[in-house]
Image (tube, helix red, strand yellow):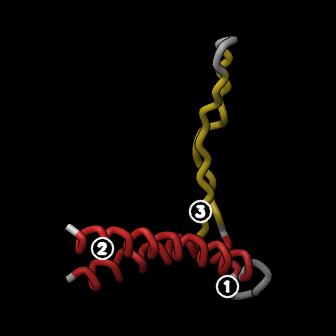
Amino acid sequence: MKNNMIKTLLLIILLLLAVVLGKIIGAASIGLKYLSWLGASASFGFSPLAVNLSVVNFTLGLMVNINVAQAILLLVAILSYTKIKS
């Protein structure tokens, strides 16, 4: 039980590091001539939808912005996790 929890925590940490480092690398490489493709990004999702029921107000929305460096590092993190897990 404890071993599975440690493995799950390891996966979460690897994924979070991949997202943060990918964002940093992508932002830093935008100005570089041969590495500017790492900063190319795509956004997808749906715009916020506000619902007002006069007693309760809530807003639903989701927007994902991912760049090439993040996608590469996420794949590396998942592959690393499968190698470490064995």
Q: Nearer the viewer, residue 31 or 46?
A: 46
Quarter of the rendering containing residue 85:
bottom left
- Asked if marks 1 and 2 touch (Cβ < 8 Å), the reply is no
Amino acid at dot 3: Ile
> Quadrant of the rendered structure where residue 27 is?
bottom right
Residue 70 placed where, x, y %?
55, 72
Q: Name the residue located 58 percent from the left edge and 76 percent from the top edge.
A: 69
Judging by the rendered image, the residue that carries numbered circle 3 is 66
- Residue 30: give x, y in percent of width and height: 75, 78
Which residue is the site of mark 1? 35
Q: CA gap, disc 3 to disc 1?
A: 16 Å
Within 10 Å of disc 3 (Cα), the crowding (few <14, some 14-19, many 20+) is some
Of the two numbered discs 3 and 1 on the same chain, state the one appearing first in sequence.
1
Residue 58 higher or lower than 2, as above or below = above
Whether residue 11 sits left or right of residue 20 in the image: it is left
Q: In which quarter of the image is residue 1?
A: bottom left
